[in-house]
Amino acid sequence: MNDSKPPVVMIFAGSDPTGGAGLAADIQSVTALGCHPAPVVTAITAQDTSELKNFVAVDTELVIEQARAVLEDMPVAAFKTGMLGSAANLSAVATILADYPNIPVVVDPVMSTGGGDRLSREPLEDGYCSVLLPLATLATPNAIEAKQLAPEADSREACIQKLMSLGCEYVLHTGSHEPTDDVIHQLYGHHRCLETFTQKRLPGEYHGSGCTLASACAGALAQGFDMIAAVREALHFTWHSLANGHQTGMGQQLPHRQYWADQGSSVRRKP
Ligand code: PLP
């Protein structure tokens, strides 16, 4: 038996059968950060790398049972939320998280796929604003999500301030959806910008980049990094996963979240 236990990250997310986004993305990311993933399934999607075909939200009672079973069994070092599938699941997850106020929570406010297909049959904006974002240690909205959550705000800064006023301790506003040459991410905390991270824009479109980033943040927080260092680590991991991405299907590219293992891999590849 190995006595050095990896920190556990509990992930609330939906499954994506392409393996690009959702639970597979989260599991690979937190594993890459040296953590043990505890995946709680909130929804099941049918999709390819181009479009969403269908989805079903997992019954709320079953979401609660999955989480409670694990929380009563092992110590959790960080939570991450992604696709929740329904307003009822969102509220249930918030109720669970509220019982663990000392464990960091990363909220990726997922409402749609990258292609714009809605990942819930009812609006989730009110639920995010009233019960989940107030519990977030870190929220990781992209520009589209930030605008949806703060529709009256007329600038990036105003959106972020609105999210912070809801109770998020830190907000990482990600920049890939904005028309800038480089991608500019900003981390806010204590109502001011703590750090701006600039990354070279990569060509192409990727499936699951937001999931990768948010889970990597949760993994780094679980490892004990402070917030600025955790976000820096997670952005580095995400950028390299995308830069090593591959065109596996016919639509968006998939991140390669095991890029770091390639050189040391003991599994032989076909030439
Ligand atoms: N979760 C699931 C299950 C999804 O299918 C998607 C997008 O397809 C997402 C989350 C969000 O993905 P992204 O990281 O591309 O924003």
Image (cartoon, grey):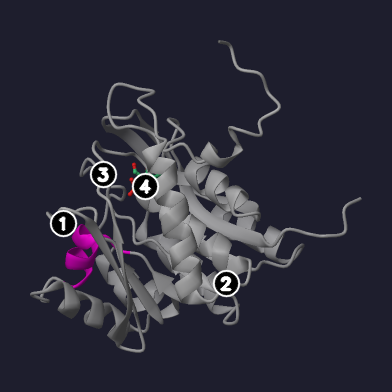
> Which is more toward the observer, 151 or 226?
226
| Residue at image point 58% right, 11% down | 270
- Does the Cβ of the disc 2 residue fall within 8 Å of ligand 1? no
Q: Nearer the viewer, mark 4 or mark 3?
A: 4
Separation (CA) of disc 2 from disc 3: 29 Å
Q: Which residue is mark 3?
A: 114
Residue 13 drawn at (x, y percent): 47, 51
Any magenta on residue 29? no
The part of the chain drawn in magenta is 141-150
Q: Residues within 10 Å of mark 4 (few under 14, many from 20)?
A: many
The disc, 2 or 3, on the residue closer to the chain's N-terminal end is 3
> Label 3 is placed on what type of residue?
Gly
Q: Nearer the viewer, mark 2 or mark 4?
A: 2
Residue 95 drawn at (x, y percent): 51, 73
Residue 107 drawn at (x, y percent): 42, 66
Q: Nearer the viewer, mark 1 or mark 3?
A: 1
Q: Which residue is mark 1?
A: 178
Task: State yes or no: discs 1 and 3 in contact (Cβ < 8 Å).
Answer: no
The disc, 4 or 3, on the residue closer to the chain's N-terminal end is 3
Q: Secondary structure at mark 3?
A: loop
Task: State yes or no: discs 4 and 3 in contact (Cβ < 8 Å).
Answer: yes
- Does the Cβ of the disc 4 residue fall within 8 Å of ligand 1? yes
> Label 2 is placed on what type of residue?
Phe
The disc, 2 or 4, on the residue closer to the chain's N-terminal end is 4
Q: Which residue is mark 2?
A: 225
Q: Which residue is mark 4?
A: 209
